Amino acid sequence: MKLRAVVLKNFRGYVLETKIPVDDLTALIGKNDVGKSTILEALDIFFNQAKVEQGDRNVLHTGEETIIGCVFDNLPGAIALENVSTSLAGEYLLNSDGTLEIWKKYPTTGKQTIWIRAWHPANEGFDDLLLKKNSELKSQIRAAGLENQVNLTINSEMRRALWESLGDTITFGERFIRVDQADEKKLWPKIEPFLPAYRLFKADRPSTDEEQEAQDPMQHAVKTALAEQSEELSRIAEEVQRKVSEVATNTIEKLKDFDSGLAAMLTPTFKKEPMWERAFYFSLTGENAVPLNKRGSGIRRLVLFSFFRATTESSLFAQKNIIYAVEEPETSQHPDAQKMIVNTFREMVEKNGCQIMITTHVPGLAGLLPLKSLRYITNGEGHPEVAFGDHDEEMLKRIADTLGVFPDFAPALSSHHGIKLIVCAEGPNDVAFLTAISKIAHQSDNSIIDLNTSADVIVMPLGGSALKDWVNHNYLQKLGTPEYHIYDSDNTDAYARACDKVNRRGDGSSARMTQKREMENYIHDQVVQELFHVQIHIDDTMDVSTEISRLIRAENPEGFSPETVKRKLNRLGAQKMTLELLQSRDPQGEVLGWLRQISEIVRA
């Protein structure tokens, strides 16, 4: 199951019912004390049964119940209710969007209750079938004359038959269904095992022993390993309880011979479930036997992110969905490490299907995040408001302005006011290829400028979906400087439209598409052999990086991914090219043609 939204009401600053959409990678952005950490801590309460304290209730509504809800998709196809397989959809337990919405309500006194917000049959007498016992369902089945059409021992069949009997007269409405009643057939124990695991890493240094353990990622490895073996551990616990209960029962029987009254007062009972996590404590210990959780926060976090990276390569973490929530991952980290952190998060999401939630207000980190992951939180009208949407230009501008996210080329513009041309390629790999080839060409023909050193031209990537990419696009529109666009031809229709739009500007800008599929198709087979030790014949239309990765992994399953191959080809392979090798792959002189046109525009 994947978390798709959080619902908060009367929890700290969230006095009104507020829904926060959640993506695979979600970044909560906003000023201090607007409610970013509140969301992560609410989820810790929901998933890990942390306690709702009096201070967690909104200060103006302390007498009202607090609500923390979660919305899920990627739902199990089948679920066992009353020990018979059925489905959440078949039992009408999904909301109007077709997702599973679970609310935990925390009253001011008494225990929490758990509810499902469902789009459920609303016909009188048919709106509470899930709460009815077998005998009640049988009576209703017989009253409807359906007793010969269903198995009267299977409740789910009887419910389905009753709902289907309504035909076109069935009506639906929103209904909250209690799922945690003290009944052997209650729904919650059947649903809870499908929920994702949730791990919260706070920004502040831990202050209690329990929190110190939580800051040690190895303990999370223990928790995850135990979760993977949950069924086997439950079987072991049941077998131990059975055997111990058998001994206890026999003991009571023998006691009757001595004192029947005393024996009658004794009942074999297990006071609590086994605490498997306390049976395993594993930590990383450094010099002088100093435990990891006693090291500085910067060191601890570097190990934590290394642990994150390790999870992307471990089959252990592929068994159960995990949500990692990290407050301010940039804390105590160098800017270079911040880039690695974002790349790590993206890799985790793509490779093993986990979800990542972070809070941040650092421009260097926020600028690298995907637009669709951004959630902008402000405090409006006395309560938090959450804005999202990768097409919301106004919201993106507010985020960029609030955090101070500037375009990649801002330093160059501030140093060189006479920029004559901006060369726009799709991504950083394309930029690496063009700049490398321009240097090689310049060494043989100084009429071709070296894009690495020219003060008159900026080469920048426009592709991508990060906030920094949006800032780059938005900033370019204000400069009035001609642009020279080069698009790959792997997405012909979309890029043809983009080229046409640029060419119709009338401001000196121009755009073209590569004749070959991508920049990698201009690199010579000889360079591939030198870099990757594989034999390949590159043509104009093949997906070069994917094919090279396939050849490498045929020999070594842990070999380079297509993304890594692509990066190495453009950043290292292009530097190994010569004009002779380029002429062999590009006899029409397309690449040198681009560079000559760029040079002529700059020198005009």
Image: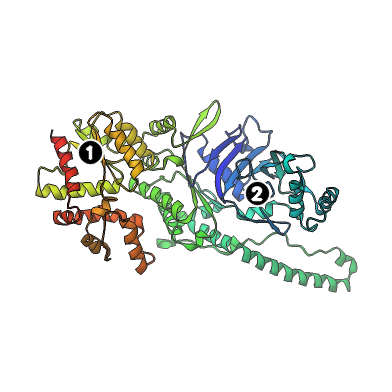
Tally of numbered tags: 2
Q: Amino acid at mark 1?
A: Ile
Residue 413 x, y percent position in the rendering: 24, 33
Name the one closer to the observer, 259 or 234. Answer: 234
Helix, strand or loop for disc 2: loop
With respect to residue 434, does 287 lie above or below? below
**In the drawing, does residue 42 fall left or right of residue 462?**
right
Residue 89, disc: 2
Residue 89 x, y percent position in the rendering: 65, 49
Q: Are marks 2 and 1 in contact (CB under 8 Å)?
A: no
Residue 240 sits in which quadrant? bottom right
With respect to residue 576, does 172 lie above or below? above
- Furthest residue in direction front, as rendered: 168
**In the drawing, does residue 137 fall left or right of residue 432?**
right
Residue 485, disc: none
Q: CA distance from mark 2 to mark 1?
A: 55 Å
Residue 596 sits in which quadrant? top left
Name the one closer to the observer, 427 or 349. Answer: 427
Q: Residues within 10 Å of mark 2 (few under 14, many from 20)?
A: some
